[in-house]
Amino acid sequence: MQIAFHTDSGIKRQENQDYVGAFTNQVNRVMVMVADGVTSTEGGDVASAMAVEHFGHAWEQTTCNSMLAISTWLKETAVYVNEIILAASQRYEDLNRMATTLVLAVIFDDQIIIGNLGDSKAFLLHKNRLKQISFDHNLRNELLRAGTITKKAAEELPNGDSVTRFLGVDDQTNIEIDQHPFLQKDMLFLTSDGITKVLSNTNIKRIMQEKISLDLRAKKLIASANQQGAPDNVTALLVSRDDEKDTN
């Protein structure tokens, strides 16, 4: 398995409110994460850093090694990290109502657990098909899933892209957890929404499949998004199922 990640403020923002990291627990189980601070409130960069670092350092202390144990741990830790972010926002006036989205993956030999709140995304490249495997928590999708709105009405919904789940803001923490196969030659891509706003799945897949090192592919995803005028911070985290040789 190989992991590569990079983050950049992008061409239109001076501050980078994305945060990314990879952590290993006591039984060598790897967790990778991307967080995207909410730009409409102060302290988004602090919230995203706190989410990844607190989640990551807590993970490093665990011996969790089963799907059930990890799912339980994720739910409990999301509540714990949310409380930490809320406490900091209440303590410091300039961080009032800071918040962040989060997407994470825990890697097994042939499975992955995906957890997310908000609209940071996880994609799986499998047999030449790139598919989003996380659920975007926005108003449109939540109403569609609940069956309270039609697809046509959802397309016309004002503020349909408004994010509905965060770490921070309030004490409602509902991390969505799912499980997916992660097989030979598969590749995982975690990102904030900066890249996907300007690059199609076809272009993302093409870069992910290039015969260059995984690190260079992550950098190229960011560079390509910036070349297309990415309106937000841009982050790319790639996990290759196989131990590929770096190619310059």
Image (cartoon, helix red, strand yellow):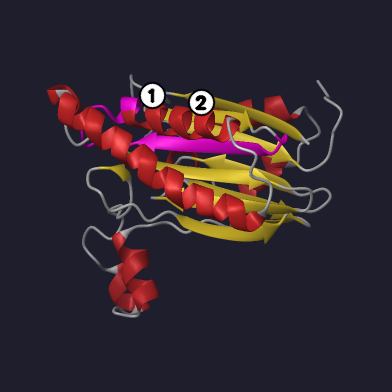
Q: Residues within 10 Å of mark 2 (few under 14, many from 20)?
A: many
Residue 121 as seen in the image, left or right of residue 141: right
Quadrant hosting residue 215: top right
Magenta segment = 27-46
Query: Which disc is residue 34 wearing?
Result: none
Say which of 197 and 139 sits in front: 139
Residue 197 as seen in the image, left or right of residue 169: right
Residue 192 as seen in the image, left or right of residue 137: right
Name the residue that disc number 2 marks.
7
Tell me, yes or no, whether the highlighted magenta stretch contains residue 45.
Answer: yes
Indicate the quadrant containing the C terminus: top left, top right, bottom left or bottom right: top right
Tell me, yes or no, whether the highlighted magenta stretch contains residue 190.
Answer: no
Name the residue that disc number 1 marks.
16
Where residue 243 sits in the image (x, y, percent)? 84, 34
Quadrant hosting residue 242: top right
Say if residue 42 shows up in the picture.
no
Where residue 82 sits in the image (x, y, percent)? 33, 41
Say if residue 194 shows up in the picture.
yes
Q: Residues within 10 Å of mark 1 (few under 14, many from 20)?
A: some
CA gap, disc 1 and disc 2? 8 Å
Tag 1 near tag 2, CB within 8 Å = yes
Quadrant hosting residue 105: top right
Residue 244 as seen in the image, left or right of residue 238: right
